[in-house]
Amino acid sequence: MNVAVLTSSRAEYGIYYPLLKRLQEDDYFNLEIIAFGTHLSKDHGHTIDFILSDGFEVNHRLSTIPQGDTSKHISSSIGNTIDLFSSFWSEHSFDLIFALGDRYEMFAAVTAAFPFNKKIAHISGGETTLGAIDNAFRHAISLMSSYHFASTEIYKNRIIQVIGTDKNVFNVGALNIENFIRQKYYTLEEFYTHFKIDLSKPSILITFHPETVALEKNISYTEELIKALEYCSRYQLIITMPNSDTMGNVIRKLLHQFIVTHPNAIGIESFGMIGYMTCMKYCTMMLGNTSSGFVEAAFFPKYVINIGDRQKGRIQTPNILNVPVEKDAILQAVQQVETSAPPERVEVYGKGDTAEKIIEIIKQQ
């Protein structure tokens, strides 16, 4: 079976990893990886290198990086990605194409495939993020897909609502969970060797993305976050950079200005999958508005101070504290975490056999 996997960013590649390994090792499948988006961007860590270092061949590379972070740049990038993939799909045939998540570039690649009647298998559909335009892209990808692999029963039911049928809609759990169970984490010493960061210090892992449905507020939101971080001098602040979303570069600039003037702050473009999981494992808490604060943090588990509305609509687990993007509210949440008992693990996202379930379902079709 000729199978293609679309991957456009560091985040979704890490989620794909257990499925990619099984596809690679199973003689039933001929796997081809299609890398595009920020994977090919030096400014975003050239994360295609992580794919190659994990032992995968990247069969196809399409350069679709936006020229900037304005709404026009993102819109133009969507059009350019559709145009590039229209030529690609006309020249390449696959029995099944995997698409994961909700990014605008993933939407563009799937949109280009749709007129060719390509069979798309969508992973992580049915989720809701009301503070990001990705919400619309996710549901659109579901409508253009032939197979649907949801991470919870709630998300499975939402897919059925979106597409109007339960045909080929499956709750298989979250692929991430298999990573956490099977991957070998770095030791504190190994992590320091790789990144020169001492995770034995009390640390906050911070990731803040733009709220793409409230563009006018992103500068003030970032400034408010930075005001809160000014009062967190007792922590090592590990700040990972935002995605290539609208106004992402503006946020990057403000964060970098904070980092260079604060010795306790460290900026990271990309840890890679094992590095990020290790950092999450050892950090004191997480802060920001990233989806990893929901699935991944529920596994370890870690307290997450989820700020703003970007992730509004996702399943809430007891380790998540939702607060507005306001200095005082953020600092109050930090204090609450400091005085709380450690959270308990919640297994709402499955038990770590998602890749196996997906393989079995595909072979039965």
Image: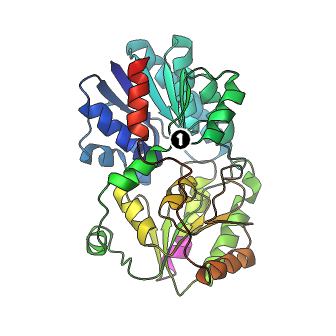
The residue under the point 76% across, 55% down is 216
Q: Does 116 sit above or below residue 125?
A: above
The residue under the point 27% across, 75% down is 189
Q: Position of residue 360 (x, y in %)?
A: 39, 27
Q: Does 150 sit above or below residue 217?
A: above
Q: Position of residue 289 (x, y in %)?
A: 62, 59
Q: Does 143 sit above or below residue 351?
A: above
| Residue 259 among magenta residues | yes
Q: Position of residue 350 (x, y in %)?
A: 50, 47
Prevailing secondary structure of the magenta residues = helix
Q: Position of residue 178 (x, y in %)?
A: 39, 48
Answer yes or no: is residue 35 visible: no
The residue under the point 51% across, 74% down is 259
Depth check: give the residue in front, 351 or 52.
351
| Residue 249 among magenta residues | no
Q: Does 8 sit above or below residue 87?
A: below
Q: Residues within 10 Å of mark 1 (few under 14, many from 20)?
A: many
Answer yes or no: is residue 228 visible: yes
Residue 323's quadrant in the figure? bottom right
Please name the amino acid that badge 1 sits on: Pro
Depth check: give the residue in front, 271 or 85.
271
State the extent of the magenta-drawn residues as a range.
256-263
The residue that disc 1 covers is 66
